[in-house]
Image: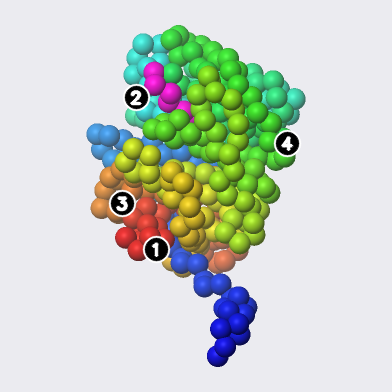
Amino acid sequence: MPHTLLFAALLAAPPAPLPEVPARVETQPVTASKGDTADDPAIWRNPKDPAKSLILSTDKKAGLAIHDLSGRLLSFQPLGDLNNVDLRPDISIAGRKGVLVAASDRSDKDVPRLHLFRLDPEAPTLIPIGTIASPEGQAYGLCLHRRGKQVDAFMVHKEGVIEQIALDLSQVPVTGKVIRRFDLKSRSEGCVADDRTGRLYVAEDKVALWRFDTSPGRAMTPVKIADVDGVRLHKDAEGLAILPRGKDGGLLFASSQGDNSIAVFRLPDASYVGAFRIAGGPIDGTEDTDGIALHPGDFGKDWPGGLFAAQDGKNRNDADEKAPQNFKLIPLGTILRAVEGR
């Protein structure tokens, strides 16, 4: 076959199917509602007993839930329309080390709020330690960032405004101050901060993934790292999570709602690695995924290589009927083998 015809045939060939990774566990739904409620997870790894680690998650029409690694609902707190959640362990809060939890609250569409909590893992419950009003737009995305001894919260508003809030954790109630702001000018939500490198990653739903420097002394100038091109990343680009490796390496995971996949990019250059879908096991997979989270630590024999959590926007029950949304838990090592061949 002539080279020109061979090249044309290759272009016309359908793309190879994405690898499928089965979920190991699904969480109990927080509510009986079959509407769009579940949104974003965060993982707390119990350093003393990893098998007793916890999954925190938002019901964006009701509050915050806590599940164990078997998916059992341990507690639910009706705290309002909390959209995204993030946490950092080993944070000094009023002079005492603890797990800092933050969530974005869009209950009041005109006055977005950042809620802060201390996690009591034994109860388990969330103890409120402060609320900070944020002046811009409707609260959507939220991620925490440990910047040396300082902890910042990044609020991503529905309209595309990103605010960096420096938290004062020296006393309770916790307070905070907006120190920088940038406007992407269209709907945005997913964000994750890399504490090693001082880089913030934000998903602008229908446009691109962006990188920002988290240093307050530098301009908050966006650097595009990936287009929402309908090939590697499909609209709406949503949840983000980082698997750190070494000083500045690792992988950036991005939920690609438009084709029910998770795209993967290599750090630090954000080169495209591949993508996968959560599907193919005895538990239904994930579709229309909003938030994702991961932790590379040891969680016991059932979770080789760490833990990955993903929201399922179109959950189905055993009879393949529409069911309330929930979260799927997947061994991280299984995902890495599918994407990297490890």
The answer to whether 256 is drawn above or below residue 145 in the figure is below
Farthest-out residue, front: 3
Identify the residue under disc 4.
185
Identify the residue under disc 1.
338
Q: Nearer the viewer, residue 152 or 138?
A: 152
The answer to whether 14 is drawn above or below residue 133 in the figure is below
Colouring used for the render: rainbow
Q: How many marks?
A: 4
Residue 287 point in image, percent of width and height: 58, 58
The answer to whether 240 is drawn above or below residue 218 in the figure is below
Q: Nearer the viewer, residue 323 or 150?
A: 150
**Measured Cα–Cα span from mark 4 to mark 2:** 35 Å
Q: Are marks 2 and 3 in contact (CB under 8 Å)?
A: no
**Measured Cα–Cα span from mark 2 to mark 1:** 33 Å
The three-letter code of the residue at mark 1 reads Ala
Q: Quadrant of the N terminus?
A: bottom right
Identify the residue under disc 2.
90
The three-letter code of the residue at mark 2 reads Asp
Label 3, residues with CA under 10 Å away: few <14, some 14-19, many ≥20: many
Q: Nearer the viewer, residue 125 or 252?
A: 252
The three-letter code of the residue at mark 3 reads Gly
**Measured Cα–Cα span from mark 2 to mark 3:** 22 Å
Label 1, residues with CA under 10 Å away: few <14, some 14-19, many ≥20: some
The answer to whether 235 is drawn above or below residue 283 in the figure is above
* The magenta segment: 144-149
Q: Are marks 4 and 1 in contact (CB under 8 Å)?
A: no
